[in-house]
Amino acid sequence: MYFSDVSVQTIKCTLRAEGLEAHIHRSVPFISNKNLHVRKTWAEEHLKWPVSNWRTVNFSDESIFHVFGSDGVEWCWRKPGERLDPRFTKKKVKHGGGKVTLWGMITAQGVGHIVCIEGNLNKELYCEILQDDVIGSYHDLHLDYHDYYFQQDNDPKHTAKIVQAWFLKNHMDLLPWPPNSPDISIIENLWDHLECRIRSCRLLPRSEEDLWIALQEEWYKIDIHFIEKLYASLPQRVQAVYDAKGGNTRY
């Protein structure tokens, strides 16, 4: 039904009177009915895990960082008069600023290695990262990986036969992971935290090389207390997935 005599302003006022507010759509992963069931079942199996259990899980992931920020709409909280403060402006460059793709892992004892990935990350390169940087992270942190679970998502390069053979050969335990579940993976929050730290620098990286240097500096300065808070949130994250019947959560 179309009411041609009702103005847009009247519609807006009516919606506001009903307690509705305008917001940008939040991007969330699409979860099929099948995967809703898989996520809920997985959450049910891990509902009773205390934080001490989650501290035996090491999270890994890849992420892309742009020299001049993302291409989408960006919001910020600032005070009046701070409109041109470098922390709250979105930088542009005429011919594109470039990007850096990272792989990284975290443990309850601190961050592990990060790796700058040139080109595409394939299954062969991923095996090299597992051998050099996953094992290397455990060594640097003085941890025995046989005492931990390794977490990765279900990307095809992670589940390839050559990769699965590496885990079997090295007797490294994988934590079964539900599909479409970045809301449970706390390293996603660490990537956001790292992005904020980079963007809060007064002198922002102006090239891919500068960005890679800045990312390394900020990564290894991440406070262990921030990581501990992320681990402490895991029981609530699992509960949220279960309560949502496998659907998207606020995390």
Image (spheres, rainbow, N blue to C red):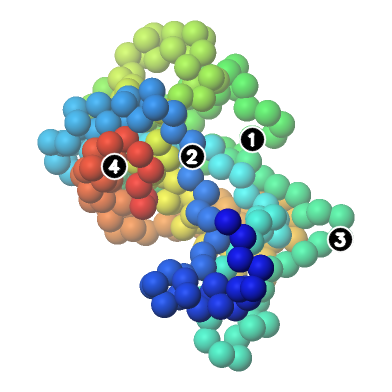
28 to the left or right of 246: right
- SS of the residue under disc 3: loop
- SS of the residue under disc 2: loop
Q: Position of residue 207 (x, y in %)?
A: 75, 55
Q: In terms of sequence position, does the residue under pointer 3 or pointer 2 come before the other?
A: 2
Per the rendering, the mark at residue 29 is: 2
Q: Residue at x 29, y 42 (%)?
A: 244
Single out the mark in the foreground, 1 or 3: 3
Q: Residue at x 39, y 9 (%)?
A: 169
Q: In terms of sequence position, does the residue under pointer 2 or pointer 4 come before the other?
A: 2
Single out the mark in the foreground, 3 or 2: 2
Mark 1 burial class by Cα count in 10 Å: few <14, some 14-19, many 20+: some
Which residue is tagged 4? 244
Per the rendering, the mark at residue 117 is: 1
Q: Position of residue 14 (x, y in %)?
A: 47, 75
Tell me the amino acid under the disc marked 1.
Ile
- SS of the residue under disc 4: loop
Tell me the amino acid under the disc marked 3.
Lys
- SS of the residue under disc 1: strand
51 to the left or right of 157: left
Mark 3 burial class by Cα count in 10 Å: few <14, some 14-19, many 20+: few
Which residue is tagged 3? 94
Q: In terms of sequence position, does the residue under pointer 1 or pointer 2 come before the other?
A: 2
Q: Position of residue 176 (x, y in %)?
A: 32, 23
Q: CA distance from mark 1 to mark 4?
A: 35 Å
Tell me the amino acid under the disc marked 4.
Ala
